[in-house]
Image (spheres, rainbow, N blue to C red):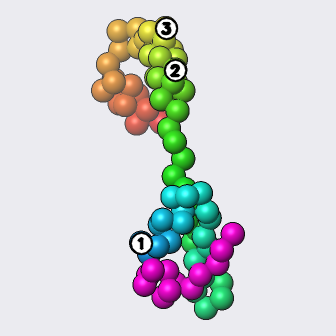
Amino acid sequence: MQEIGAYEAKTHLPRLLDLVERGERITITRHGKRVACLVPASEVDRDKVDAAIAKIKKIRQNNTLDGLSIRELIEEGRRF
């Protein structure tokens, strides 16, 4: 992992982004202390996202408010 000062990072950001795009990790320092890391963006696994959404929708089908409204539940919670 490469370390670079904040001023140099600001000056050479396009070059640093090219390196990160190729898989490198870069730590940005200020006065010798680590303050940030530039890392490659992770790819979103669309199948996992779709599966999670499907699970949430299935859970919602089995859980109802039994005729109560959201407003009634809010008011009930305020009594305590």
Q: Amino acid at mark 3?
A: Asn
Looking at the image, can residue 27 be seen?
A: yes
How many residues crowd around disc 3 within 10 Å: few (fewer than 14), some, or many (20 or more)?
A: few
Disc 3 to disc 2, C-alpha distance: 17 Å
Magenta residues span 1-12
User: Mark 1 or mark 3, which is nearer to you?
Assistant: 1
Q: Residue at x 52, y 32 (%)?
A: 45
Q: Residue at x 45, y 80 (%)?
A: 12
Q: Quadrant of residue 70?
A: top left
User: Mark 3 or mark 2, which is nearer to you?
Assistant: 2
Q: Amino acid at mark 1?
A: Pro
Task: Report whether 58 appears left or right of 24.
Answer: left
Q: Position of residue 22 (x, y in %)?
A: 55, 58
- Helix, strand or loop at label 2? It is helix
Q: Residue at x 52, y 20 (%)?
A: 51
User: Label 3: which residue?
Assistant: 62
Quarter of the image containing the N terminus?
bottom right
Q: Residue at x 40, y 36 (%)?
A: 78
Q: Which disc, if any, is residue 51? A: 2
For residue 65, above or below residue 8: above
Disc 1 to disc 3, C-alpha distance: 51 Å
User: Label 1: which residue?
Assistant: 14
Circle nearer the N terminus (3, 2): 2
Q: Nearer the viewer, residue 53 or 62?
A: 53
For residue 60, above or below residue 43: above
